[in-house]
Image (cartoon, rainbow, N blue to C red):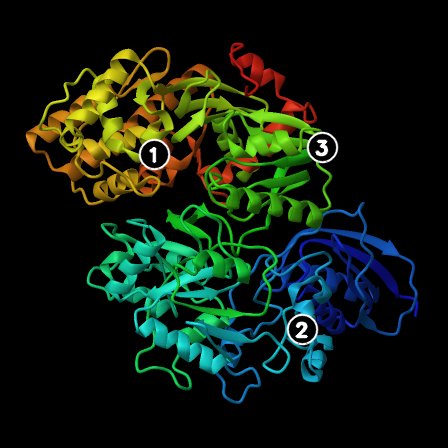
Amino acid sequence: MTDVHRRRFVVRGVVQGVGFRPYVYRLAQECELSGFVRNDASHVHIEVEGRSSDIERFSTRLESEVPPLGRIASVETTRMPSVFEPEFCIAPSGPTGHDREPSLIPPDTAVCDDCVRELFDPADRRYRHPFITCTNCGPRFTIINALPYDRPNTTMGFFDLCAVCRKEYADPNDRRYHAQPLACPRCGPTLRHERDGQVTIGTDVAIASVQADLAEGLIVAIKGLGGYHLAVDATNDAAVNELRRRKARADKPFAVMVPDLNAARRVARVGSAEASALQSPAHPIVLLRARTGSCLADGVAPGNPLVGVLLSYTPLHHLLFARGPDAPARVPTALVMTSGNVAEEPICFDDVDAHNRLDHIADSFCTHNRPIHTPCDDSVIRLLNDVELPIRRSRGYAPLPVQLPMSVPPTLAVGGEMKNTFAIATDRTAWLSQHLGDMGNLETLNAFEASVARFIQFYGVNCAVIAVDAHPGYQTRRWAMQHKADLGVVKVQHHHAHLASLMVEHSHDGTEPVIGFVFDGTGYGNDGTLWGGEILLGDYAGFERWGHLREVLIPGGDSAANNPCRTALAHLHAAGVEWADELPPVIVCDEAERRVLAQQLAASTNCVASSSMGRLFDATASLLGLRHRITYEAQAAIELEVLAGKADRSFPLAFSINEDGSIDPTPVVRGVVDAVRAGVDTAAVALGFHDAVVEAMVACAASIREERLLSVVGLTGGVFQNVLLTQLATARLREYGFDVLTHRLVPPNDGGLALGQAMVAAHRRGRVPTNEAATERLDGRWSPCV
């Protein structure tokens, strides 16, 4: 043959563990090509041979018909000499080595519709098999212990395939070809139920026992994909309240799992965007507006009109909602599914650890013998203008990478203290870890250290730079100084990292600064005070603090976050408003507490100067009588947002903006007090407060545009988890012609810090060209972070 050509394709992206090789095999057969496809450590290697027109057809379809879970980042093609192979085959995986390029590990995904149909088909050999999976679904990230992603490198390597499964595994035309978690009831993991020392093994008896426990109002610890859940019947008030008592979780809403979309619509309002998010391969927890009068117990989300809903995402979950052999008279319709941990600790994923830490909470355990190598909690999102706004990025998303707008040296960014995630970055790719939690205990620190080691092993990145938050008290910074002091440690200012993270999401190249409204609860400022209401003009190399919320002395510093009433009294003091007996925060603080606070404020002792917008939201919630003491982070601010959403009008409030760019809250605080005394509808005041914040932002942005000719605005920091505020601010800023950036890939809260830290550290180390012209244009007030 004269028209025989050969071409090599090197495909990078999420192309291992997602059915990519059998897809390529079938595509090559359809295009009548010979050659091979194989996994290498960092990519998929394809060589095809045949007529030129068939190779072109293959090349076109290769990227347009990717399997559901696949994501192609790049394709490199090279012409090769023909070798006249007789057929196309799937070759064994290529070699690995320490000098390999990093590979992309796929996240865990929800069980697919095909597997669910087989799960409930009595004629199927995997009928009611709680571990049914295929190349289009199931565990990935949580079972991988080495690369490349082959069965011996997963926790399923412990299970030898039976003859039938082995045939499926080896057949490129089968949906389960090289599905590494593949198994069946004959050769796969087994389910077990444990209660009061009694153990039952087997799917039907274990499921029926769990259903009976739930119907009895008991708390069951259930082992899932990335760890344990604590489950109770979400319609049983007594069971939900008992779970709260045992877990010491007074008010924070619980997530609710339901079997399908119809069930979700019975407990919450679900539009098309919400439905798409719920049914996406990630199956995250989606914060939805609860339906009044639904079957859910009041204790699921006390005093909160939002409820976190997720659909069943494993075969085991589907079986829990279905009637099977020996099922009790009543099977669940909705389950509380909260992380299996003690408050503030990481999720349990090891069976022995789970029994040690959860035994005083759970009445029974539903477990299995498939090990979890990497723990991974559920993800949480909200919808902002029908687009996902991540609140917690974990299962279903981690460890998918974020593409960087420019290359960086090998970097470990350790993130923050709250909602910790870290990142490994090199060249133009950053891999973000799963959610790890708050670093205030040894268990989370140990989980952090173990996860960092796994990522370095997985991706083979020898980090030359380590990025840390500038706060001297953060555990992550201490860990870096103790364990990685031999690397180049770069301190990154907290709010600069927030802004840089948002810029990376939007592929901003940093050639022009962005106007950043960075509003959160607290972050260590360059001047040693607590920042949190920041207006920054920044790129990756540095930032200028153009303006900020005017500082207020807060008694107790960070500890004031748990006591909005104290923050309210501090703002009253700063605004020159007397602590009158009729004001809600004054009423709730007894005389002794008020006396101590007054002494501290008068002498400026045990007080920290704070420009926190988050604390101002808390103070306003207390002034309106909403919430004076909190039991979970941002509780007061959340309730203020909820109240504002009920308003049919907005009470007029306005900040003063000083010539130095500081936003003075005094007129707003006084206006709220006047409204309370006048008996104005609190919802109208709450909405008026939101509007006042937005109008102050618009005024500052307009002044900056006039001075600096900048027109791109970024909204970041934990305060912008507030969807009402973000929607109002986005709409108003766009009315004024601004290009507005909001989060869509990583959370606006501290869960997104590491991404920004990595980019800033790269510039601080001088590895990436800085924008000198922009620096000069900012009149010499540019700060290289710290």
Q: Quadrant of the C terminus?
A: top right
Q: Secondary structure at mark 3?
A: loop
Disc 2 crowd rating (10 Å Cα; few below 14, some 14-19, many 20+) is some
**Front: mark 1 or 3:** 3
Which callout, 1 or 2, points at the residue further toward the start of the chain?
2
Q: Quadrant of the N terminus?
A: bottom right
Q: CA distance from mark 1 to mark 3?
A: 40 Å
Can you give x and y, in whole percent of width and height, for residue 304 in the image? 25, 50
What amino acid type should be assigned to the residue bearing mark 2?
A: Phe
Mark on residue 159? 2
What amino acid type should be assigned to the residue bearing mark 3?
A: Ala
Q: Secondary structure at mark 2?
A: loop
**Front: mark 2 or 3:** 2
Depicted 465 relative to depicted 61: above or below: above
Outermost residue to the bottom: 123
Outermost residue to the left: 678
Can you give x and y, in whole percent of width and height, for residue 342 in the image? 42, 51
Which callout, 2 or 3, points at the residue further toward the start of the chain?
2
Location of residue 721 (image quadrant): top left
Mark on residue 729? 1
Residue identified by numbered label 3: 464
Marks 3 and 2: in contact by CB < 8 Å?
no
Marks 3 and 1: in contact by CB < 8 Å?
no
Disc 3 crowd rating (10 Å Cα; few below 14, some 14-19, many 20+) is some
Which callout, 1 or 3, points at the residue further toward the start of the chain?
3
Of the pair 539 and 41, the residue shown nearer to us: 41
Q: Secondary structure at mark 1?
A: helix
Q: Residue at x 46, y 74 (%)?
A: 193
Mark on residue 533? none
Can you give x and y, in whole percent of width and height, for residue 483 in the image? 65, 34
